[in-house]
Structure formats: structure tokens, C-alpha cells
Image: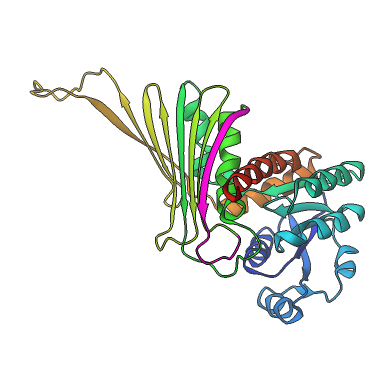
């Protein structure tokens, strides 16, 4: 099977990361080049990674089978529709689009053109998250508590913290809970932005009685990516950044020491083995695999739309 020819639209921070991974996956893909409206930026990045830059996007699209779109959210729909109509498979950085209407139209155009559309919810490929189904398989979940805190980043200006950061956890929440929500409470504050919240909290109750709390901040000096899960029999702690999972559970067991134990064991804490795979590399590899094998991507347009719908609802409540 011939190599998939790929291009990157957007040479910013995230676009550069995609370029680097595509170069690492040279056995599976051929990186044709990069396009960005900032021609100097595109030129510099292309030189750094020994690829071509294209002053016109149509010239790049003529040569590729698939693209990563890593541009500001407000431009997702424009470039997504352009690529879909030219029958180019799309890995779209999250969120899928700026509005639900745009997202539904993009999904439709991709479908009628036979185009694979994957949304870049990268945390789904974090090894600490991919381990969770095996851990939760026999557990009765009571609640989930997500915390995603970051320092101020002045590069992000066109979306609020809900669509910028919390969206990752909303996608994981949907994946784990797999139920419709009953009620949502939310609050937030604008700190550096005039109209977009930089700090937000949400509390969601689902129809299956699972409670979810989410906190997202881009005004916190420390960087935190954490999920805690309460189940009927366990307490599970997940550290996304350090790839750590610990499970505390009540248990009755006999400790074989060779001598009498003079104290009582209350519980046991397990540390789960988590591999150190690169989430972005896993995400892009999954995208390539879905195209070559004509499979629906793990995180397709509908998954991206579902996360966007709840993010919009939370933002709406905050603004109200």
C-alpha cells in the first residue's frame, strides 16, 4: 500500500506539532507541505522540518490525500468545507467548529464526499485515559471530578475556557458516562478577556444519576490535568500529565509475612502500569489507520459535535 500523502493547514503551535509527528511517521505517510496565511511563519516551519510551504492552499490540496487543520476555531468551517469538497480526509483540531450549525454542515459534506473526519480530542489517546475502560468495566460510578488548570496563554483569544480547555474533559466525560444529562449548573469569570470566561466551573447530573464536576482555568500558574472517580467500591485518581493512575479500594485479604500482623489493614492502594506513548502520535496514527482501512475514526464528527453541544450549553448558562 502506498504512503498516504498529507499536508498541514496552520503553522502555529499545534500545527508544528502535527508536522513533527508526520515526519516521525515517514514509513506510513509522506508529508507534502504546509500552508498558513502567515507566509513567513509557514516558510520558517517548512525549512525547520525539511518540507515545502505553499502560498496558495489549493496548490497544497492538489497534492495530498489528507490534511490536519490546525487554525483558529473561527476558521475551522471555512477550511473544513474546502477540504471536504476536494475529497481530502480531515484531522480537525478541536473544537470541531465554532457553532453547532457549522459542525453539522461539515459532517454532512464529509459524508456525501466519502471523507474521513476525525476531531483532535487528544486526551482520548493519553495512555492514562485509555486504561480506564479496563478499570471501570465492573465498577458502579458515582461521580467524576475533572480539573484542568493552566497559566494564562495570550495566544488563545477567540474562544472561552470552556471551549478551549474544558472541552477535552467534556469529551472524556461523554465517553465514560454514555448517558443524557438532566441538569447543568455553571459559573465563570472573565479575567483577562473582555467577553470570554477564563475560569469556569460546571456541575452536571446525568439521567443515570452520575454526578460530574468540571473546573477549567487559564489563569492558574500551576498546570494541572486531573480526574478523580468515585465508585461504589473504589476511589480512582488519574494524573494526565505524569501518566499516573492509583486505585484505593476496601478489601479483605491476608498478608503473608511469615509472622503475625499486629495491626488491621483498612484498604489497599494499587498503582496501575501506564505506558509512555505519545498521545498526539497515537491520535495521528489512529487517523491514518482509519483512512487506510476505510473505518470510521474513533473520534468522528458526531463525537466532536456532542462535546460542542454541552460546551455551548455551559457557556450559555455562564453568560446568562
The image shows residue 257, relative to residue 57, as above or below, that is: above
Q: Where is residue 166 shown, x and y percent of the image? A: 55, 49
Q: Residue at x 58, y 65 (%)?
A: 194
Q: Residue at x 64, y 49 (%)?
A: 283
Q: Residue at x 59, y 69 (%)?
A: 155
Bounds of the magenta segment: 180-195
Q: Nearer the viewer, residue 59 or 155?
A: 155
Q: Nearer the viewer, residue 263 or 231?
A: 231
Q: Where is residue 145 shown, x and y percent of the image? A: 45, 39
Q: Nearer the viewer, residue 86 or 182?
A: 182
Asked which quadrant contains residue 25, the reply is bottom right
**Would you say 320 lies left or right of 8 here?**
left
The image shows residue 318, relative to residue 51, as above or below, that is: above
The image shows residue 178, relative to residue 20, as above or below, that is: above
Asked which quadrant contains residue 34, the reply is bottom right
Q: Where is residue 100 shown, x and y percent of the image? A: 76, 45
- Tell me the colour scheme of the image: rainbow
**Would you say 210 lies left or right of 4 here?**
left
Q: Where is residue 291 shown, x and y percent of the image? A: 79, 45
Q: Nearer the viewer, residue 32 or 182?
A: 182
Q: Is 305 in the magenta?
A: no
Amino acid at each position: 500500500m502506498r504512503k498516504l500523502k498529507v499536508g498541514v493547514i496552520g503553522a502555529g503551535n499545534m500545527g508544528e506539532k502535527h508536522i513533527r509527528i508526520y515526519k516521525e511517521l515517514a514509513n506510513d505517510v509522506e508529508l507534502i507541505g504546509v500552508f498558513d496565511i502567515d507566509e513567513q511563519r509557514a516558510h520558517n516551519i517548512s525549512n525547520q522540518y525539511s518540507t515545502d510551504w505553499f502560498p496558495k492552499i489549493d496548490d497544497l490540496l492538489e497534492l495530498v490525500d489528507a490534511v490536519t487543520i490546525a487554525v483558529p476555531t473561527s476558521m475551522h468551517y471555512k477550511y473544513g468545507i474546502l477540504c471536504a469538497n476536494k475529497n481530502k480526509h480531515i484531522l480537525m483540531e478541536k473544537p470541531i467548529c465554532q457553532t453547532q450549525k457549522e459542525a453539522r454542515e461539515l459532517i454532512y459534506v464529509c459524508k456525501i464526499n466519502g471523507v474521513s473526519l476525525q476531531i483532535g480530542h487528544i486526551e482520548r489517546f493519553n495512555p492514562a485515559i485509555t486504561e480506564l475502560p479496563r478499570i471501570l468495566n465492573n465498577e458502579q460510578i458515582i461521580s467524576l471530578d475533572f480539573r484542568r488548570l493552566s497559566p494564562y496563554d495570550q495566544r488563545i483569544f477567540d474562544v472561552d475556557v470552556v471551549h478551549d480547555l474544558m472541552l477535552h474533559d467534556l469529551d472524556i466525560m461523554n465517553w465514560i458516562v454514555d448517558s443524557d444529562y438532566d441538569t447543568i449548573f455553571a459559573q465563570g469569570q472573565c479575567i483577562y478577556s473582555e467577553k470570554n470566561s477564563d475560569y469556569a466551573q460546571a456541575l452536571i447530573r446525568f439521567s443515570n444519576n452520575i454526578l460530574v464536576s468540571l473546573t477549567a482555568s487559564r489563569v492558574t500558574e500551576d498546570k494541572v490535568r486531573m480526574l478523580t472517580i468515585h465508585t461504589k467500591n473504589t476511589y480512582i485518581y488519574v494524573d494526565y500529565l505524569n501518566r499516573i493512575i492509583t486505585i484505593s479500594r476496601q478489601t479483605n485479604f491476608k498478608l503473608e509475612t511469615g509472622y503475625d500482623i499486629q495491626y488491621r489493614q483498612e484498604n489497599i492502594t494499587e498503582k496501575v502500569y501506564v505506558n509512555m506513548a505519545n498521545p498526539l502520535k497515537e491520535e495521528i496514527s489512529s487517523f491514518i489507520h482509519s483512512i487506510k482501512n476505510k473505518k470510521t475514526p474513533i473520534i468522528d464528527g458526531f463525537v466532536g459535535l456532542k462535546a460542542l453541544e454541552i460546551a455551548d450549553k455551559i457557556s450559555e448558562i455562564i453568560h446568562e
